Image (spheres, rainbow, N blue to C red):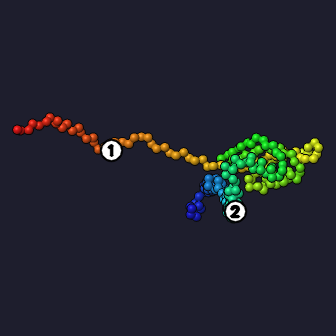
Amino acid sequence: MSASYWNGLRPFEKRVVVGFGVLFFVVINLLFVLPHRSDLTDAEVRYNKAREELDKYYKEFSRTNGYARALAEYEKAAGNVQPEEQGLQFANAVNAQAVISGVPITLGRIDTTTNQFFLEKNVTITVRARDQQLVDFLYNLGSDSSQIRVRGLVVRPDVPRQTLDAQIRLVASYQKKPTAKPAATASSTPAAPIAAARGSAPVPNQPPLSTTPTSTSK
């Protein structure tokens, strides 16, 4: 707006122009400025959150070597679990250690639980022995290669208080055999005729050969 045009306006017209200018400024701010006044704060929040996530990823990445060592240890420990066939020797191993330690035992029912990878056998035995014999028996079970371990133990003295009566819950884990996948059965659909397989038309019927004997001239 030029100065000559502004000077040529009446006072009322000047007030109207100023009023429209102020109204235009307010509308522009309401439409384009005020809705975005929190954008800077939101951007700062997103930036801080992204930095926290990045720092967390860096920390986890720095622990990958430790995770790899732990995984190798777990795989090594899992490799020591004996195969399923040795689970059949569970009762024999318990009886053998009882004989070695000179401990009379009464073997209960052997229970078996299983999951996708392991088979677990457990049994409750009743023992009456002196304290040293009981300690030797438990020690030999723990150090034996059968990997039988004690899950529960209840000990009380007998009536004369010369021996100990104990109920011991024994357990051992074994690897399961991988289940073999069933072999795919061969298709029983008979083979198509050669002519149909090649897409050729069937051969038309030939006229039969004459079987009338020919007379020979004398």
* Residue type at numbered disc 2: Arg
Marked residue nearer the N-terminal end (2 or 1): 2
Asked whether residue 160 is in view, the answer is yes
- Which residue corresponds to mark 2? 69
Residue 94 lies, in percent from the top left, at 77, 49
Residue density around tag 2, few if under 14, some if 14–19, many if 20 or more, within 10 Å:
few
Residue 200 higher or lower than 23, as above or below: above
Mark 1, residues whose alpha carbon is within 10 Å: few (<14), some, or many (≥20)? few
Q: Position of residue 50 (x, y in %)?
A: 67, 60
Residue depicted at x 29% and y 44%: 200
Secondary structure, mark 1, is: helix
Residue reaching furthest to the right: 160
State the quadrant of the C terminus: top left
Residue designated by label 1: 194
In front: 39, or 190? 190
- Asked if 126 appears above or below 4 in the picture, the reply is above
Q: Is residue 154 left or right of residue 206?
A: right
Which element carries disc 2, helix, strand or loop? helix
Nearer-the-camera pick, 57 or 3: 57
